[in-house]
Amino acid sequence: MSSKFYLPSLVAGFGAAALSTVPGVKAVGCCIVVPLAVFTALLLFRKSLNDNQNLSVKTSISIGLLTGLFAALFSTFFEFIITLFTHSNDFVQTLPQTVQVLDDLKLGEAAKQTVSLMNSMANQITSTGFSLLYTVFVLFSNLVVDSIFGMVGGLLGRVIVNRRTNI
Amino acid sequence: MIWCAGIFSPVLFRTAQSNLFSDLYLPRIYSLVCHRDALKSFFIEGNKLEVCARCTGIYAGALIFSIVALVRGFRMRTKKLLYAAIVLMAADVFSYSVGIYGYSKWIAFITGLILGSVSILYIFAGIEEYFSELKMSPDVQ
């Protein structure tokens, strides 16, 4: 695979992950951060081609998927690093409310096991700054969601990036 | 449709027995794509939807127009509609961010609904074109 293909995705994915760690960006950007990153990647890729050829759907979706995957990997890495240094994250901070909700629901044995598991993860995070289970969960959910939004961003970004409209 | 069902799950499945998936995992999944700020979210009979008003609009619009497009078969021949929808939403975000007017859930919902409705038509067009590309040549750049 040519570097022309994956470098724009790498740069844009890194940018999206970095933006997602900035407090307040998510409140404004919401679900458009990854699609915007894909749009940037498509622009960069098109510039690197040095011709006026329209991007195919296959190429756009591939760049979108790749950008989403890079964004997921980098955002998981950033969360891992921040958690490692601060020994805290959103999960630990909201755990008391989550446990309260679960207690109110009176779910029985299943809830007890889940609460115990969550407490164990939170204890690991507060003591060592790392929980393998939590990191795997975050990585998996980021990979699924970001890759889907990346491909959607690829389809939409292509419409804007291509000069000649053949939609 | 599944994604939208998840958004409305606090309302749709409130009579069913609560479970860990709907009370713990779904909020976590939707928090990846939305800030889920209670002040910017709709409540139906006291139950907060899983995403904010704008995202609710985007996904509801996408769902409604995907059904409409499947039945009617819309063809998008211009980019202007997509640009207009993006500008409309950006104008709303900019306006309330700089304080021209306060945040309105309904304006956010409507601008989201328009963008979601328009976007899904372009996404459908892209998918259709992808299959055409596959038929014509498997290695088209």
Image (cartoon, coloured by chain):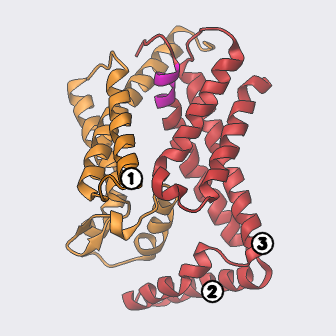
Chain colours: A red, B orange
Give the vertical position of A16 relative to B129 (above or below). Answer: below
Front-most of B84 and B17?
A: B84
Mark 2 neighbour class, 10 Å CA radius: few under 14, some 14 to 19, many 20 or more: some
The residue at 66%/58% (across/down) is A139
The residue at 32%/79% (across/down) is B17
Callout in the foreground (3, 2) = 3
**Circles 2 and 1 in contact, beta carbons < 8 Å:** no
Mark 1 neighbour class, 10 Å CA radius: few under 14, some 14 to 19, many 20 or more: few
Q: Residue B9 in the image: state x and y as whole percent.
A: 32, 65
Q: Quadrant of residue A133?
A: bottom right
Q: Which residues are magenta?
A: A155-161
> Mark number for residue B3?
1
Is A158 included in the stretch rendered in magenta?
yes
Is B74 included in the stretch rendered in magenta?
no
CA–CA distance in space, label 2 to label 1? 29 Å
> Mark number for residue A99?
none
State which chain disc 2 sits on.
A
Q: Quadrant of residue A21?
A: bottom right
Front-most of A117 and A85?
A: A85
Q: Are marks 2 and 1 on the same chain?
A: no
Q: From the viewer's perspective, is B138 left or right of B7?
A: right
Q: From the viewer's perspective, is B33 left or right of A52?
A: left
> Which residue carries the number 2 mark?
A119
- What amino acid does circle 2 point to? Asn
CA–CA distance in space, label 3 to label 1? 33 Å
The residue at 62%/83% (across/down) is A117
Name the element at disc 3: helix
State which chain disc 1 sits on.
B
Q: Quadrant of the C terminus of chain A?
A: top left
Give the vertical position of B101 relative to A40 (above or below). Answer: below
Q: Quadrant of the N terminus of chain A?
A: top right
